[in-house]
Image: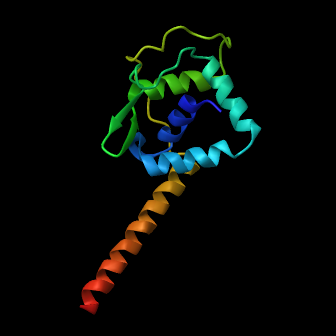
Amino acid sequence: MNFQVTVLKILVSYPNGFAVMDDIKRDMAILATSGRDWAERTRRLAARVPNLDIFSKGLVDRESGGWKITDKGRIVLEFMEARAGVDQPIETAPSETVDRPVPPLPPLAERAKRRREQRERRREGRERARSTAS
């Protein structure tokens, strides 16, 4: 499994491209144990952009408590996933100036959002129960 490609894929699945470290670690563990298909897929994607370094190339920013994919990161990921054209590796990332719409949220992001909302509702319910019990 290619760690850097997996991080990009995880972050792009979250709203606004931001995920806290606990969510990233959980999703990473799920994908790492999902079988050989995922490892082969990330290896193929990584081959499209040799010397991929998501932090030094500005594809992912570290923010308080988590990581966020940048617009440049989205463009590079789209390039890696593009099936059209020759399957040759590139030496540099695609241009940052390309203006592309953000793709819709995939199911992983929707499930993560739903889990966060459920946790928040449970937390609010516990707080209400504590305040009325006092």
Quadrant housing residue 68: top left
Q: How is the image coloured?
A: rainbow
Residue 33 to residue 111: above or below:
above
Q: Where residue 24 appears, x then y in whole percent?
A: 49, 45
Furthest-bottom residue in this view = 133
Q: Where residue 130 appears, x then y in whole percent?
A: 29, 84
Q: Is residue 117 left or right of residue 7?
A: left
In the picture, the quarter occupied by the C terminus is bottom left
Q: Is residue 118 left or right of residue 44?
A: left
Furthest-top residue in this view = 91
Count of residue discs: 0
Quadrant housing residue 111: bottom right
In the picture, the quarter occupied by the N terminus is top right
Q: Nearer the viewer, residue 127 or 80?
A: 127
Q: Residue at x 51, y 47 (%)?
A: 25
Q: Residue at x 38, y 23 (%)?
A: 58
Q: Nearer the viewer, residue 56 or 97?
A: 56
Q: Where residue 56 appears, x then y in whole percent?
A: 40, 20
Q: Residue at x 44, y 35 (%)?
A: 102
